[in-house]
Image (tube, rainbow, N blue to C red):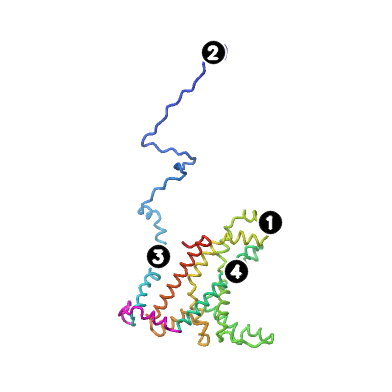
Amino acid sequence: MSAASVPSRTRTAEPAVIPGPNAPARSSHTGGRASSDRRGRRPPSPKVPWRKALRRDWALYVMALVPVAFLLLFRYVPMLGNVIAFRRFRPGGSIFGDEWVGLRYVEMFVSDPNFWMVFRNTAILGFLTLLVCFPLPIVLALMLNEVRTRAFKRTVQSISYLPHFLSVVIVVGMAMQLLSLQGTVNQVIESFGGEAVAFLQRAEWFRTVYVGSEVWQTLGWGTILYLAALTTVDASLYEAARIDGANRWRQTWHVTLPGIRPTMVTLLILNIGLFLNVGFEKVLLLYNPLTYSTADVISTYLYRVGLVANNFSYATAIGLFQAVIGLAMILAANLVSRRAVGASLW
């Protein structure tokens, strides 16, 4: 029998099975994943009712009650007291003032030459602190990142972290002991044939002493975030840079610094927002009437005017003015950072 005489077998088409309305939806992906639409977008997940979410995560909400209550009680409720910047407050009277005086206290500190002196001192100290204390932790973090001996790296980290855990009183006490007329620094100066310098009694030395103590106390602690950010930089970028012939300096400049740029920008914006909030405790413990011309800042001026002289409305007006300037600076820094480098807080 020839091949032409053999009847060909044809495959009959199977009937299409139409799923019923209650049949489960078949997924086109493996692993039970939900199918996506024609544009590749997955359908939105169903919203969980808040009652069910509260029953499921009640422990997390209970843990969040304490910090939320702290913020409400010590951060937002005191904002109501800012109204006495525009009302006359007398001790023993209403907490919101007795009578409306408008911008009287604002006009008082605007026309007060002492206020502008302390404002200038605050701006200079804040600028010097930002200029010196912000980049140094980045430099130290980059140097520690290049250390390959783990024991040496941990030793340097422990030594640099230690001053952060000392109180301001101890730090100022150590600075006074070192910089006094009979202190270690003057003893070294005299051993080289120089004359002892009254660092703590001369106004021109106060800013150097303040910034130097601030660097010693905050340098090591500031490297923690940068060291954590350095671990997120992709190692393949370094390998590609080495293949292209980049040395260690160019790898740091073109790979490491761009990798930690979001962290740097975030901390810079936060530091700019605290530009005028120069440390009250350290300045109060370090300064004296001989150094008022360069050491007196807004926080210490408010302490003398508000608490010592009992002029609470005047001090509140100055504090509100300082807060408005800080808010404007952080908003401007955030806007410039978002436009320039594409990274911002919000």
The amino acid sitting under disc 4 is: Ser
Query: Which quadrant of the figure contains the N terminus?
Result: top right
The amino acid sitting under disc 3 is: Val
Structural distance between the alpha carbons of marks 2 and 1 = 75 Å
N-term mark: 3 or 4: 3
The amino acid sitting under disc 2 is: Ser
At a point 48% along the width and 23% down the height, the residue shown is 11
At a point 53% along the width and 64% down the height, the residue shown is 265
> Quadrant location of residue 207?
bottom right
Determine which of the numbered discs, if any, sits on residue 5 in the image.
2
Query: What is the magenta range?
Result: 91-113
Q: Nearer the viewer, mark 2 or mark 1?
A: 1
Residue under pointer 1: 245
> Quadrant location of residue 223?
bottom right
Structural distance between the alpha carbons of marks 2 and 4 = 93 Å
Label 4 crowd (10 A; few <14 / some 14-19 / many >=20): few
At a point 45% along the width and 84% down the height, the residue shown is 113
Q: Position of residue 320 (x, y in %)?
A: 41, 75
Q: Nearer the viewer, mark 2 or mark 4?
A: 2
N-term mark: 3 or 1: 3
SS at circle 1: loop
> Within the magenta stretch, is there residue 101?
yes
SS at circle 4: helix
Q: Nearer the viewer, mark 3 or mark 1?
A: 1
Residue under pointer 4: 158
Residue under pointer 3: 68
Q: Position of residue 125 (x, y in %)?
A: 53, 77
